[in-house]
Image (tube, grey):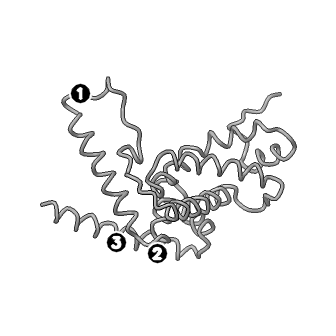
Amino acid sequence: MEVDDSLLSDVDLMDQLCAGQKNRLEILMRRYYQPLLRVAWSKLLHRQSAEDVVQETFVAVYGARESYNRNFSFRTWIWTILLNLCRRELKRQHRRSVVQNIDPDILHSVPPAGIINPENGLSLLLQKERRQQVVHALNQLPEPQADAIRLRFYGELAYDEISLTINCSLSGAKRRVKTGLVKLAELLQTEEEHEA
């Protein structure tokens, strides 16, 4: 009897991947690609770099499949890999002094042209502008706070997963998100005041 792939846990998929079932990596990619891309994109501010880092993340998962410890959460393991690769990419970009522009569709894709009409067109433009402002402000926060917010809202991780991913206590993860959100709101408020 064939088992529905969606019913398999991440740990089961890793076990099967280690046993030689390479197609299990594709299932993990379908599960994690979009959330990983949202976080990488918000951190790197460049779609191609974000896509490359996400691909590198899955290459790293495959390469380290034998060393994965099934007693630990796969989710926190893959998020830790992604954040480390993002940091490495940022250092590489800094060394090359590459100036990146914020991609306007940083967090969500733009609806197909047929969906945009005069009634909702202005609303969509305002939403895109607001997303750009949020990402810009997010990148002004200290990295621990910004990463905690990215993991919470773009990656949809629970606080206990965030604490394991960024190696801090549960209360520390909550504090980083809360403090980061307060600072983020202050930055956005200041930006709005300057525009007025």
Specify the quadrant that holds the C terminus.
bottom left
Tag 3 near tag 1, CB within 8 Å:
no
Specify the amino acid type for callout 1.
Asn
Q: In the image, what residue occupies the spot 52% across and 49% down?
A: 49
Query: Dot 3: what SS?
Result: helix
Residue at image location 33% in from the left, 51% down from the top? 131
- Considering only vertical position in the picture, is 10 above or below 21? below
Q: Position of residue 163 (x, y in %)?
A: 58, 69
Which of labels 3 and 2 is toward the front?
3
Sequence-wise, the earlier of marks 3 and 1 is 1
Q: How many marks?
A: 3
Q: Earlier in the sequence, mark 3 or mark 2?
A: 2
Residue 157, labelled with which disc? none
Q: Name the residue rendered at 63%, 68% in the picture.
A: 164
* Amino acid type at mark 2: Arg
Per the image, the residue denoted by label 1 is 117
User: Of the residues under marks 1 and 2, which one precedes in the sequence?
Assistant: 1
Inter-mark Cα distance, 3 to 2: 12 Å
The residue at the far top in this view is 114
Query: In 3D space, how far apart are the residues under numbered discs 1 and 2 (Cα atoms)?
Result: 42 Å
Position above or below: 71 against 109:
below
Q: Secondary structure at mark 1?
A: loop
Tell me if residue 175 comes above or below residue 3 in the rendering: below
Q: Residues within 10 Å of mark 2 (few under 14, many from 20)?
A: some
Q: Who is closer to the viewer here, 9 or 87?
A: 87
Displayed quadrant of residue 33: top right
Q: Amino acid at mark 3?
A: Lys
Q: Give the residue pinned by disc 2.
A: 175
Q: Secondary structure at mark 2?
A: helix
Q: Which residue is mark 3?
A: 183
